[in-house]
Amino acid sequence: KSEITKQLIIDKAFNLFYRDGFKTTSIDKIMKETTLSKGAFYHHYKNKKELGTAVISLKVKKRVVDGMIAPLLNSGNAFKILETVFINRLKSFPFIDKQNGCPMNNLINEIGNTEIAYQQALKSIIEEWKTALVNVIERGKNEKSI
């Protein structure tokens, strides 16, 4: 039950951060969305900063890894992989994503300069993506598909 509660808080926080912005989303607002007590929040997180880091590490990173990193690791024609990953990703965005933009980019713009913990968490995602991109491009150069 404890892990389910923790996941519910992370899911609702991610949705609110994405929809309303990190800075304008309060702990009270998150907990109202979960219908849990504020005590449940403090049982799992010391503060909003700790929750923010968890949202970045668990929700934002998973979204980038699943959609933009893992597919780059597939075998096959590197150019086609790059083309497919980017085109499929753009096509797969639901309307809310098209309306609200990239959650990671939104967080970088809103809180990327405020806390070292956020900077590090966001930067590690970008570095992982960059490494996957460089690797697939280099592979494509070697196999002459790029």
Image (cartoon, rainbow, N blue to C red):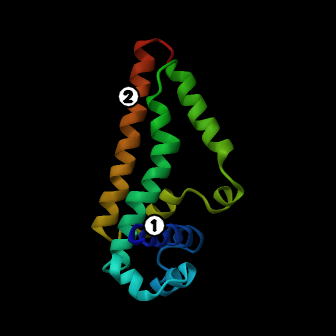
Label ID, residue 78: none
Q: Nearer the viewer, residue 126 or 92?
A: 92
**Disc 2 marks which amino acid?**
Asn
- Asked if the residues shown at circle 1 and circle 2 are in contact, with their CB atoms under 8 angstroms apart, the answer is no
Residue at (35, 45) in percent of width and height: 127
Residue at (53, 43) in percent of width and height: 67
Q: Position of residue 78 (x, y in %)?
A: 49, 22
Give whichever of discs 1 and 2 has the lower sequence position: 1
Q: Position of residue 90 (x, y in %)?
A: 64, 43
Residue 10, relative to residue 103: is it above or below?
below
| Residue found farthest to the front | 1
Residue at (38, 28) in percent of width and height: 135
Q: Secondary structure at mark 1?
A: helix
**Disc 1 marks which amino acid?**
Gln
Residue wearing tag 2 = 135
Name the side, left or right, on which 19 lies relative to 22. right
Residue at (39, 39) in percent of width and height: 130
Closer to the eye: label 1 or 2: 1
In the picture, residue 53 is in which quadrant? bottom left
Q: Position of residue 83 (x, y in %)?
A: 59, 29
The image shows a total of numbered marks equal to 2
Q: Gap between marks 1 and 2, in whole Å?
A: 33 Å
Name the side, left or right, on which 109 lies relative to 50. right
One can see residue 124 in this view = yes
One can see residue 112 in this view = no
Q: Nearer the viewer, residue 36 or 74?
A: 36
**Crowding near the residue tagged with mark 2, few <14, some 14–19, many ≥20 C-alpha atoms within 10 Å:** some
Label ID, residue 7: 1
The quadrant the N terminus occupies is bottom left
